[in-house]
Image (cartoon, rainbow, N blue to C red):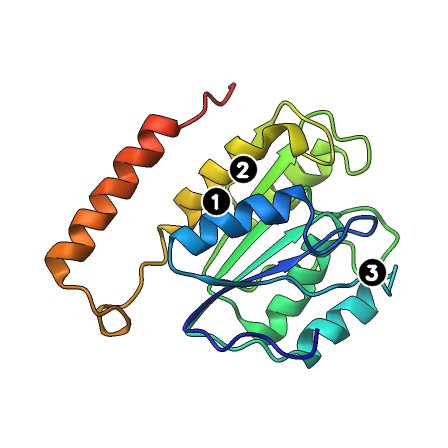
Amino acid sequence: MSALPQAERLVLFAHGRESGPWGSKITRLAEVARTQGFEVASPDYSAWKDPEPRVEHLLELQPKAQTLILVGSSLGAWVSLKASASLKPQGLFLLAPAVQLGVFSEDAPAPQADRTEVIHGWDDDVVPASNALRFCEEHRLPLHLLPSGHRLTDQLETLAYLFAQFLQGFPASAAADPRSAWELEQEANFQRKTFENEKPRIPR
């Protein structure tokens, strides 16, 4: 990927070690991001199996946006965490983050973002749920534990719902949107009602 889109609001995805830039999770979450006015980009990291070269590649792309959201899955979540120290994104949305494994240069880079949320599967046999619990406890992060495994692909609509709620915490500035305040309010109300009607039942 030679260049990133110029955008005021950008969601930047980082895929896992064995997946690709437009797998089912990224494709679904990209749809959610676009409906909320974000540009999306998903670099291809498949040339590198280790996380450090992926971080270097991400930083070389020099993503810039007034609102930058990094979304990472598995190894991509580690990459997003590590890159957050340099990029200082407004948001980090981490799926089954590969933390506390003792195989990378850092067990778990500290999140450097205004808001961070973590989604993990109870039955993850690659990164145990206890790893995510320790990581979130250390950094006091919101954690959503779902009845799923490492890939989380059987929870796409739940992921989409959680991501939509996360992105609503980063509203577009009035100056960046030509619509009136009344129109923006009506759109926000419509989206809230839509998401509430489509809200999946999340087991507790």
Task: Identify the amino acid type marked 1.
Answer: Phe
* Residue 68 higher or lower than 103, as above or below: below
**The N terminus lies in which quarter of the figure?**
bottom right
* Residue 199 higher or lower than 134, as above or below: above
Task: Identify the amino acid type marked 3.
Answer: Ser
- Residue at position x 36%, y 58% from top? 170
Q: Which element type, helix, strand or loop, lies under badge 3?
A: loop
Of tags 3 and 1, the one toward the viewer is 3
Upstream in the sequence, badge 3 or badge 1?
A: 3
* CB-based contact (under 8 Å), mark 1 and mark 2: yes
**Neighbour class for label 1 at 10 Å: few (<14), some, many (≥20)?**
some
Most foreground residue, 204 or 110: 204
In which quadrant of the rendered view does residue 42 lie? Answer: bottom right
In which quadrant of the rendered view does residue 28 lie? Answer: top right
Q: Position of residue 133 (x, y in %)?
A: 64, 37
Residue 46 circle label: 3
Task: Identify the amino acid type marked 2.
Answer: Leu
Residue 159 circle label: 2
Could you tell me if residue 67 is visible in this image? yes
Could you tell me if residue 117 is visible in this image? no
Q: Position of residue 15 (x, y in %)?
A: 71, 54
Most foreground residue, 39 or 121: 39
* Residue 126 higher or lower than 178, as above or below: above
- Residue at position x 63%, y 22% from top? 147
Query: Residue 115 vs residue 133: left or right?
Result: left
Q: Position of residue 169 (x, y in %)?
A: 36, 53
Badge 1 is on which residue? 163
All told, the count of numbered labels is: 3
Distance, label 3 to label 1, CA atoms, is 24 Å
Q: Position of residue 106 (x, y in %)?
A: 79, 60
**Neighbour class for label 3 at 10 Å: few (<14), some, many (≥20)?**
some
